[in-house]
Amino acid sequence: MRIDWTALPGTVALGVADRVGGSDVIPATSGDHAEIAATVAGDRGKVFVKAAYSEFGVRSLRYEVRVSKAISRSYSPAVEWQFEAGGWLVVGFEHCEGPHADLSPGSTDLELLATLLSELGKTPAPDVGPFVPIERFGFPHPAMDGDTLVHTDLTEANLIVTPDGLRLVDWAMATKAAPWVELAALAPWLIGAGHSPEQAERWLAGNLMWAEAKPEDVTYFAMKNAEKWARKASQSTAPWMHDLADWTQKWAAHRRAASPPC
């Protein structure tokens, strides 16, 4: 759960200010893996700061740092520095300047995303103990297994359009899987951005990774993902969770209708 920057211990806030040369703080408006997420500006420029103190938050942030350091790709922000103080883990990531991507139908940002997906699909998963599909998604299937780095959370909030291209942030759920799993995980977010399930699949079909998946495996993923989010939404009042339940259900219904009868 996010907390306000002012709730940080003084040693933590001072440690950030010393590294940035100031403490002009703009809190992030999305995400919840770390207790603190904010852009911090000072005399030395801007950094994106994440800080965590809960067991889950620290474990998640340590994993994100390991992945970020291991891949070192043009689309992934660098880790500038990190320190620990007062029971907190604090990390300064390279700041990405620009708006979040627009994934709605017809958006030019979709072209940037297509380019990023092509590069990402060729990136081997680093040897940092990455998640595997059963850990990330909660359901197994042999066709989901693979050796490719899969971000699995390509929301508009995690895609930033910078002058140097599209940047992909928040690697806390990075997974070692088959390349097509990235596209299957993306489908509900395209639907949430305004695509119909048919439109979403037509767009995904423009990526060579989509053809590598058997239709029945994609349908399996869509059905199981919809079941998972329906179950989660039934136990939560979080609006984003109910949105995901709706989007995944729409995609699963489309896959069911399109599947030939047995």
Image (spheres, rainbow, N blue to C red):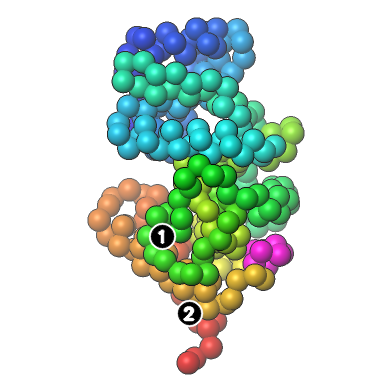
Dot placed on the residue nearer the N-terminal end, 2 or 1: 1
- Is label 2 in a helix, a strand or a loop? helix
Q: Position of residue 253 (x, y in %)?
A: 46, 75
User: With respect to residue 66, does 199 lie above or below?
Assistant: below
Q: Residue furthest left?
A: 235
Residue at mark 2 to residue at mark 1: CA–CA distance? 23 Å
Residue wearing tag 1 = 134
Direction from residue 40 to residue 228 in the image, left or right: left
User: With respect to residue 138, does 213 lie above or below?
Assistant: below
Direction from residue 167 to residue 93 in the image, left or right: left
Residue 92 visible, this orientation:
yes
Identify which residue, 6 or 15, lies in the foreground.
Answer: 15
Q: Residues within 10 Å of mark 1 (few under 14, many from 20)?
A: some
Amino acid type indicated by mark 1: Ile
Residue wearing tag 2 = 256
Is residue 262 a member of the stretch shown in magenta?
no
Magenta residues, dominant SS class: helix
For the point 41% across and 60% down, which residue is it?
A: 134
Identify which residue, 13 or 163, lies in the foreground.
Answer: 13
Identify which residue, 171 or 196, lies in the foreground.
Answer: 171
Direction from residue 34 to residue 115 in the image, left or right: right
Q: Position of residue 153 (x, y in %)?
A: 51, 49
For the point 43% across and 22% down, which residue is it?
A: 90
Q: Which residues are magenta?
A: 202-210
Name the quadrant containing residue 243: bottom left
User: With respect to residue 74, does 53 lie above or below?
Assistant: above
Q: Which mark is residue 57?
A: none
| The N terminus lies in quadrant | top left
